[in-house]
Image (cartoon, helix red, strand yellow):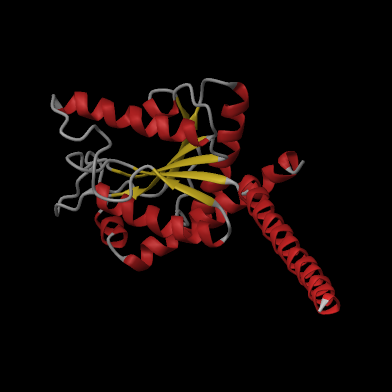
């Protein structure tokens, strides 16, 4: 009887050791997996995409009633999906047709617009983005022959941020000139009169993807296929910029 108890005790100890070993191995594996995920997320570049306007603010409006805000959002969502597939952490300032003012907020349109812009800027700053890109469309009704995509960056502020923003703008503008502005290339331009670009804490650009006031460009901008062409340019250019700055942050 004592011998049986002794054997059972030994067997229990062996099984306990095996279970503990398996548990320890499983725990180690899980910890390694979690640690790997954390490292991966820490290393993933962060891009904020800001679909311009939204809600009561339709932005520029074409002669046929097409609102800028809707095309901005469509392009932004398509760009978001492409960047996410590349492992980029993407933050949208808005994901539906809404303004970024407080729910139930009242006041003049100008007051609500100011709230909206401050909230967009706050999202970008809190994200500590490697790049923020605000998607817009242009309009120049005084001359409807004007067309093409153009990129803007902050011309004043933190020298390092201005330098990085200008570098990103140049990459994006080159992409637009190669695929969109084939007849008349444009140059990236610095601006200091746009709220989002003032005192920027992260590299930021505004991508004006075309003119709603140009009849031909308007028809193109409404087509999903053309929007995809714009998104391809933005995607390739953003990835190129992130790749350029990666070595400096690799360690």
Compared across the picture, whether 5 is left or right of 231 comes to right
Q: Looking at the picture, does residue 111 appear above or below residue 188?
A: above
47 or 149: nearer the viewer: 47
Residue at (75% x, 63% y) in the render: 20
Q: Quadrant of the C terminus?
A: top right
Q: Looking at the picture, does residue 198 appear above or below residue 40?
A: above
Determine the residue located farthest toward the front in the rendered image. 1
Q: Quadrant of the N terminus?
A: bottom right
- Residue 30: % across, % down: 67, 59
230 or 4: nearer the viewer: 4
Residue at (19% x, 46% y) in the render: 61
- Residue 174: % across, % down: 55, 49
- Residue 117: % across, % down: 32, 30
Can the viewer see residue 213?
no
Compared across the picture, whether 63 is left or right of 36 comes to left
Residue at (32% x, 42% y) in the render: 52
Q: Looking at the picture, does residue 99 appear above or below residue 227?
A: above
Number of marks in picture: 0
88 or 135: nearer the viewer: 88
Can the viewer see residue 23?
yes
Instruction: Determine which quarter of the picture holds residue 224.
Output: bottom left
109 or 155: nearer the viewer: 109
Instruction: Determine which quarter of the picture holds residue 140.
Output: top left
Residue at (67% x, 49% y) in the render: 39
Compared across the picture, whether 38 is left or right of 209 comes to right
- Residue 54: % across, % down: 25, 43
């Amino acid at each position: 009887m004592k011998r049986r108890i002794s054997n059972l005790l030994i067997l229990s100890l062996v099984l306990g050791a095996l279970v503990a070993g398996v548990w320890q191995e499983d725990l180690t594996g899980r910890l390694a997996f979690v640690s790997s995920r954390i490292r991966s997320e820490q290393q993933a570049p962060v891009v904020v995409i800001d679909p311009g306007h939204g809600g009561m603010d339709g932005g520029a409006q074409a002669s046929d009633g097409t609102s800028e805000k809707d095309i901005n959002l469509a392009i932004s969502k398509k760009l978001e999906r492409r960047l996410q597939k590349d492992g980029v952490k993407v933050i949208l300032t808005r994901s539906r047709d809404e303004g970024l003012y407080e729910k139930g907020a009242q006041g003049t349109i100008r007051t609500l617009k100011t709230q909206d812009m401050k909230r967009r800027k706050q999202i970008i700053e809190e994200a500590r983005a490697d790049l923020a890109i605000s998607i817009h469309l242009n309009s120049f009704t005084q001359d409807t022959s004007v067309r093409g995509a153009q990129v803007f960056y902050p011309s004043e502020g933190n020298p390092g941020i201005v330098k990085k923003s200008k570098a990103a703008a140049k990459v994006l503008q080159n992409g637009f000139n190669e695929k969109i502005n084939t007849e008349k290339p444009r140059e990236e331009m610095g601006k200091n009169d746009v709220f989002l670009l003032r005192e920027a804490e992260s590299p930021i650009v505004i991508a004006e993807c075309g003119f709603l006031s140009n009849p031909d460009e308007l028809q193109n901008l409404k087509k999903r296929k053309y929007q995809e062409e714009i998104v391809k340019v933005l995607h390739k250019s953003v990835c190129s910029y992130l790749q350029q700055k990666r070595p400096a942050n690799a360690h």
